[in-house]
Amino acid sequence: MSTGGLVLLLSGPNLNLLGEREPEVYGTATLDDHVAAATSAAVALGLTLEHVQSNHEGDLVEAVHGARGRAVAIIVNAGALTHTSWSLHDALAAFDGVVVELHLSNPAAREPFRHTSTIASVADGCIAGFGGLGYPLAVEAVSRILADRR
Ligand code: DQA
């Protein structure tokens, strides 16, 4: 299946530390490893992947603004901003394409503060709890949703 188009993969705070950060929760793969897996999946499906990581909320908001009219989808692992950021929620609400919320761990099975997502209501769906497998799965989900919409 080849749908074409640009997919923005957004990575929030502390995800740059993957591989070193709480490996018992997040695994030993680095963010570069996950981006490489997502990129391979995208290329196989005829999509182009662009990745932005930032520890700053405003940078992520601006990356979403920059995707407007340019990207067909956003895959977002917002890290802890998932649980707090209404500005990211509002930015994603103003984005026209597919939005997939992504997490390595399963926040619903963790501390209560992780049970709320500000992004969930503006996402088409969420992939969580499958570790690094979630990255290619999210790209696959984008491709299938786009194919269904065309
Ligand atoms: C995370 C889950 C969040 O609760 C946490 O703050 C993260 C990573 C995940 O991928 O499992 O930084 O988004």
Image (cartoon, rainbow, N blue to C red):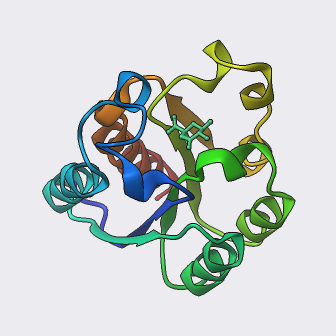
Q: Give the percent coordinates (x, y) of residue 96.
A: 66, 69
Task: Report which quarter residue 28 is drawn in.
Answer: top left
In which quadrant of this rendering is ligand 1 seen? Answer: top right
What residue is shown at x 30% (from left), y 35% (from top)?
132
Task: Report which quarter residue 88 is drawn in.
Answer: bottom right
Q: Give the percent coordinates (x, y) of residue 79.
A: 59, 48
* Position of residue 36 in the picture relative to residue 55 (left or right): left
Q: Give the percent coordinates (x, y) of residue 2.
A: 23, 58
- Is residue 145 visible from the viewing direction of this image? yes
Q: Give the percent coordinates (x, y) of residue 43.
A: 16, 62
Q: Is 35 in front, or is 40?
A: 35
Task: Report which quarter residue 47 is drawn in.
Answer: bottom left
100 lies above or below 43: above
Label total for image = 0
33 lies above or below 113: below
* Position of residue 128 in the picture relative to residue 19 (left or right): right
What residue is shown at x 51% (from left), y 42% (from top)?
102
- Is residue 123 visible from the viewing direction of this image? no
Q: Is 28 in front, or is 86?
A: 28
* Position of residue 95 in the picture relative to residue 45 (left or right): right
